[in-house]
Amino acid sequence: MSKLMIPSKLSLSWLREKYMSQQLKPEEVIKEIIKRSQSDEKMNIWITPPKMEHIQPYLNRLSELDFDSSPLWGIPFAIKDNIDLANIPTTAGCAEYSYTPTSHATVVKRLIEAGAIPLGKTNLDQFATGLVGTRSPYGETHNSLRQELISGGSSSGSAVSVARGQAVFSLGTDTAGSGRVPAALNDLVGLKPSLGAWSTKGVVPACASLDCVTVFAHSLEEAYQVDAVARGFDQEDPWSRDVPVPLATLPKKIILPKDSVLFYGPFANEYQMAWKQAVEQLKQLNILIEYIDYEFFSEAAAILYDGPFVAERWADLGGFINDHPGVTFPVTEKVLRSSAQSKYDAASVFKSMHKLQEFKRRAKSLLKDAVLVTPTAGGTWTRDQVREDPIKTNSDMGLYTNHCNLLDLCAVAVQAGEAAANLPFGLTFFALSHEEGLIAGASEAFVNKCQSGQNTTQVAVCGLHMRGFPLEKQMLEFGATFVREDETAAKYQFIKLPTEPPKPGLIKKQSGGRAVQLEIWEMPLSSFGAFAALIPAPLGIGKVELQDGSEVPGFICEGYAIEGAEDISDAGSWRKLPLNI
């Protein structure tokens, strides 16, 4: 038995390190998770809790998998109970609806094939209808930090299982914010990929045309590690799309609401202060800020619950509810039956579709090369307060989430400090579905800025320090992060130095120069001096003029190096030269 202390927050990277060094075995981690789930039983996190008898076959299978080629080898994860895990009941939060699937949902299958260990099925707002985490006959899921508060929903148990150290990551679903709100309320990252990027085959539909499977994790890095495994086209899913794994890059601008941002509930003032602090952090990213009228997004969001789109839920669940009177959670049935109103006829559906198409066109124009940033949640409440007013509190919770899938946006919710003691505050970054790399890059820059508190400098690199080349690791070792691809002003001569290995040199000319492609990275000032000291002559750090006329620190070369060097200016990029350079 290992005597290694297992941390209260489980990390993918920490577990893989301990597995590799044989300081820890997956079986030991599972036993600790089972103990934790039993200790937290009254928090109503699980519907089917972790038990060794249904986990053991997945542990046994690890011996058949190669550790190095299985990125999630031995990594335990939780599954929202509207997503199928073979031979384990799927309830969607309703025992009478329950069925036992014989196969995994596509995303679950992909994670297991990569070595991940499914633990069990987590609690949720019944039929994934709600953002509060209190609408379940299996009990109200408690907040992970302050148990009198709501957990957020509908992916309540999935978020709290990760926050309480009972899973490394978990799967949720997100139609109107269910994969983001619980992240904000439990100090987690919640990644909602583009519609169709993750298969929804084997997922109980809420609104099939808008549903997404999502991931909760403690960090962006680990959320995207899961994304790299789960993402991919599924021929058997009619809603699936081929959306590539995002490459993190910074947007050209950040879009913020220009008017006062509204918050509700007993902590509205604390949230307001936290938002203002977060905006100041965003301003330090050296990305253009643009303020817009947010009413457009609010109007789009209203289509989801104040229009005929809500009837899509009834199309999937109406038959069950009519055939099983009295078994549905009362507030859930009230919401679902509201969609069966006669005013939601075929004509109203088409009118809303046409209106939504206008909103999508506007969003596409507004968000080109940009990210929208808002608070993740419109507030938070105690569980008692939500019980007293379940409809309005739920509606206010979704103030900044409901528009997302309707407008075909991707989103990631990240931590943004505390509004008060044990009261996390979160931001969400939104982008167009085909520009997922922008939310990856912008959210990473924001989180790094918040965590480090360091001043940074941009660095232009044009050779071996670029991504995919041997000295990229040096950039990473000095804490640098990739920002974007760019090019110089048309004022440079580009040469290949006769060194081993060959290196490029960038020399500014008074006339006759060319533009050279390069990369812009951001590096902490605290490590920039040591990095620059390693650069051998005739190379050095100086000001590099970019195509837009701005100047950034970057690699330059002394003029004398032209003698004996090869002129490669016509190539215009180190990447375009033969691989044997």
Image (cartoon, rainbow, N blue to C red):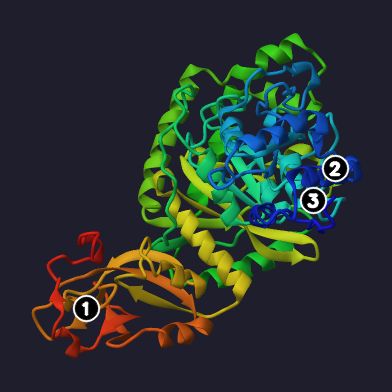
Q: Quadrant of residue 534?
A: bottom left
Q: Secondary structure at mark 3?
A: loop
At horizontal 80% and vertical 66% (from top left) the residue drawn is 421
Q: Quadrant of residue 136?
A: top right
Q: Secondary structure at mark 2?
A: helix
Residue 151 at least partly seen: no
| Contact, mark 3 vs mark 1 (Cβ under 8 Å) | no
Q: Tag 1: residue type?
A: Leu
Residue lying farthest to the left in this orientation? 512
> What residue is disc 1 on?
497
Determine whether 490 is above or below 304 in the image: below
In the image, which disc is placed on residue 347?
A: none
Specify few, some or many for label 1: CA neighbours under 10 Å numbering under 14, 14-19, or 20 or more.
many
Q: Nearer the viewer, mark 1 or mark 2?
A: 1
| Dot 1 or dot 2, earlier in sequence | 2
Residue lying farthest to the top in this orientation? 323
| Dot 3 or dot 2, earlier in sequence | 2
| Contact, mark 3 vs mark 2 (Cβ under 8 Å) | no
Name the image quarter holding the C terminus.
Answer: bottom left
Specify few, some or many for label 2: CA neighbours under 10 Å numbering under 14, 14-19, or 20 or more.
many
| Dot 3 or dot 1, earlier in sequence | 3
Q: Nearer the viewer, residue 230 or 125?
A: 230
Residue 360 at least partly seen: yes
Q: Relative to residue 460, is residue 557 drawn left or right?
A: left
At horizontal 39% and vertical 52% (from top left) the residue drawn is 366
At horizontal 42% and vertical 33% (from top left) the residue drawn is 241
In the image, which disc is placed on residue 37?
A: 2
